[in-house]
Amino acid sequence: MLIEAGEDSVATTRISLVLLSGIALAFGLAFVFAPGKFGAVLGLETSGSVAALGRLMGAAMLAWGLILWSARRFDAEAQAAVLRATGFADAVGAAAALVASVSGAMNVFGGIVALVFLCGAMACMGLSMRERRAAAEAEGVILHNYE
């Protein structure tokens, strides 16, 4: 089934950007304001250096959440670029969280974090490819359709 570009596609992309923004902002706020408690939930060691690193990561997550929130108003090409970057970063985050969870550096919640990152990566890549297909079709370029 070919997903048609149109108003539904735009709405889906915007809703996805809002959801991704909310997740990023929630993680960011948790790491900035309660790095020890949030880190403990994830099974991380509680030390001053881990708390400082958590706050730095939280600041980056807050920034990315605001970028995602702003991207709702971007044109389709810019949204696709933001989605590709987010998808790549989420894939790396999923791998890092999975390795940390399997190695014992994080508890079972690390696996849940890996799953959240993996779902984000898959959603972002799928949406960015849909935007790419829509842009190509608008220009009259036919991409492969393996249906």
Image (cartoon, helix red, strand yellow):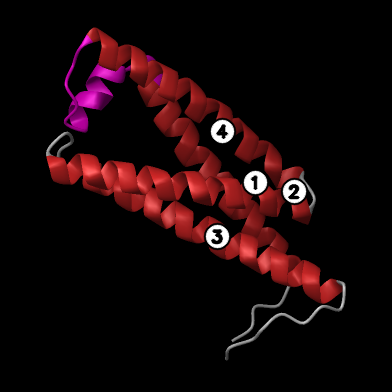
Picture quadrant of residue 135? bottom right
Q: Position of residue 88 (x, y in %)?
A: 51, 49
Q: Which mark is residue 64?
A: 4
Question: Mark 4 is on which residue type?
Answer: Trp
Q: Secondary structure at mark 1?
A: helix
Q: Residues within 10 Å of mark 3 (few under 14, many from 20)?
A: many
Q: Position of residue 81 (x, y in %)?
A: 68, 50
Please determine whether, in this image, residue 62 is positioned above or below residue 88: above
| Residue at (68% x, 54% y) in the render | 80
Q: Position of residue 15 (x, y in %)?
A: 60, 53
**Residue annotated with mark 1:** 82
Please determine whether, in this image, residue 84 is positioned above or below residue 8: above
Q: Is residue 82 magenta?
A: no
| Residue at (76% x, 56% y) in the render | 76
Whichever of callouts 3 and 4 sits on the residue coming sooner in the sequence is 4
**Residue annotated with mark 3:** 125
Please determine whether, in this image, residue 124 is positioned above or below residue 98: below
Question: Mark 1 is on which residue type?
Answer: Val
